[in-house]
Amino acid sequence: MTTLLQLDATPREGLQWGRGEVAECEIEAFAAALPLGAADQRAIVATLSNFPSECQVRGMFFDGLVNVIKKERDADTAERLMLHAGVRARAIPFALLPHRDFYKLYFMAAAVLYPDLSLDRSMQRIAETFYPVFRDSMVGRTLSAMMGSDPRRILAKLVDAYSMSVQDNSHSVRVSEEHAMLWECRVEPSPFYGGTFRGIVLGTLHSHGVTGGKVDVVSRVADGPEHTRWVFRIGW
């Protein structure tokens, strides 16, 4: 397995998939270019092939991910990855954009920035930055001001933040123990979502001064080809 991503930095027609249908061979070619093992590449193909077209994410997260790439590597790497993923140079923060295109850049960034980690762990590392990106937005500053430092309140408000940030997902959270809550969600069909969610929650708790958080998977069940239902236990 190589450790470098060989990129064709020339923009091509159809590079940005948007919400339309994408040929399986194009998805396979995208995954094959990533410096990952065959099992991870197959999982990426399955994720992108079954990704719900109606699922959209706020533009601020595209910019936030690009900034992570610039910070961990450099602006040239960020530009090459964006070109290869078909991601525009600048996104309107609260504009809704295809979540599948975000995942293309997310998969590439995880593989390139943290080649010594498993894909699940590298995606978690990146996801730890997602809430701070939201918190820096105008709406995020208002919502985060109401969170305080109580993990129960933080996680309850995180449901609202998540609902504002990603369409076509559903989330709920409830107290299960004195120092734990259960989070239930219906989300995109990524087998790596556990790492992503863990990063989002730990990044959120840390942003509000809560340390020692732990996220465990309770259950994971497919809900048709385009969605997966997860239950997580969040303790502190």
Image: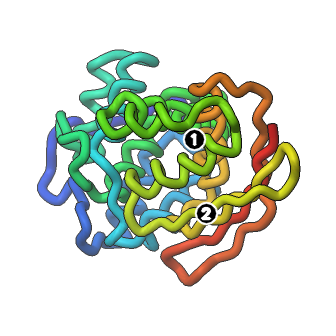
Q: Is residue 162 above or below residue 169?
A: above
Circle 1 is placed at which residue position? 200
Q: Is residue 120 visible?
A: no
At x 23%, y 61%, the residue is 18
From the viewer's side, name the closer residue of 159 and 14.
159
Q: Is residue 164 above or below residue 60?
A: below
At x 44%, y 43%, the residue is 106
Q: Earlier in the sequence, mark 1 or mark 2?
A: 2
Q: Is residue 147 left or right of residue 68?
A: right
Q: Which secondary structure lies at badge 1?
A: helix
Quarter occupied by the C terminus: top right
Q: Is residue 41 above or below residue 226?
A: above
Kind of residue at disc 2: Ser
From the viewer's side, name the closer residue of 104 and 153.
153
Q: Quadrant of residue 9?
A: top left
Kind of residue at disc 1: Ile
